[in-house]
Amino acid sequence: MALGVLLVVGSALTFYAISNRLSAHRQILAVTHAVTVGEVFGAGDFTFVTVSVDTGGLQFISQADESTVIGRQAAVPIPAGAPLVQQDIGPPAPASGLATIGVLCKPGQYPPSLAAGDHVDVIDSGVPTGVSGGSSSSPTTSAPIAAVVTAVDAPADTATNGEVVSLQVSAVDVAAVARAAAAGTASLVLVAPAG
């Protein structure tokens, strides 16, 4: 008789645990319209959908985290109605008067510990990496350009040595940084934040 009681209680607890798990849901963000790469998310771009708590490892963005997405850019195209996952969200959009540019930095052109949020000076040495000395006609080092690191990524081409560093710079300096990046002469120096 005791065994029967234990079986009934065990079955009830198992049923309760399963039904509770199946009924556990949460609200997540989904986009109300198709979103293109680089589009900046605004408050009117989202709706809320309900999903099971067990999402199979997908990193959905909770309704409670909506404010952390507003002002950020889409990293990939997102179809209308699709739920947002962490991988869909790119860096914040540059503020007015600022621009974001990627610079391929070879070893020796940046501190190995460089990370998003670091403040750096971009220095154009005028001499590409791996070229020692230089002739008397080599350009002189230009004035440092202040920048903030927004991301540090490995190059898409695995044969390329170094890191792609995304920098937020003043819009008036972006052309100078682009020239140095294209020439392979941009070096990044870690500095303390201004102010």
Image (spheres, rainbow, N blue to C red):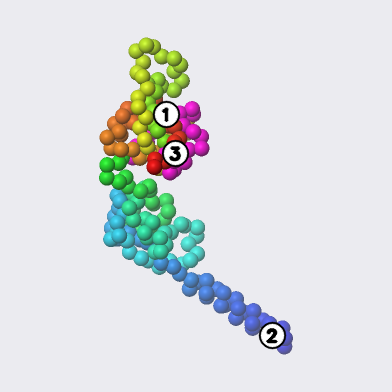
User: Horizontal and vertical percent for residue 80?
Assistant: 30, 58
Disc 1 secondary structure class: strand
Residues packed near mark 3 inside 10 Å, few (<14), some (14 to 19) or many (20 plus): few
Residue 138 lies in quadrant: top left
Q: Could you give the CA–CA distance between mark 2 and mark 3, rounded to whole angstroms?
A: 71 Å
| Amino acid at pointer 3 | Ala
Structural crowding at the residue carrying mark 2, measured as other residues with C-alpha within 10 Å and reported as few (<14), some (14–19) or many (≥20): few
**112 in relation to 56, above or below:** above
Residue carrying label 1: 187
User: Which amino acid type corresponds to the residue marked 2 in the rendered image?
Assistant: Gly
Q: Quadrant of the N terminus?
A: bottom right
Give the main secondary structure, helix, strand or loop, of the magenta stretch: loop
Q: Magenta residues, as a range?
A: 100-119
**Seen from this angle, which residue lies furthest top?**
136
Q: Which residue is drawn at 36% across and 19% down?
A: 140
Instruction: Name the residue: 48% across, 71% down.
Output: 24
- Residue located 48% across and 66% down the image: 53
Q: Which of 43 and 56 is in front in this view?
A: 43
Q: Where is residue 42 in the image (x, y as percent from the top left)?
A: 29, 56
Distance Cα–Cα, label 3 vs label 1: 16 Å
* Res 79 → quadrant: bottom left
Residue with the most extreme right position = 2
Left or right: 159, with 103 as reference point: right
CA gap, disc 2 and disc 1:
76 Å
Per the image, label 2 sits on a secondary structure element best described as helix
Residue sitting nearer the eye, 174 or 79: 174
Amino acid type shown at disc 1: Ser
Q: Which of marks 2 and 3 is in front?
A: 3
Mark 2 highlights which residue? 4
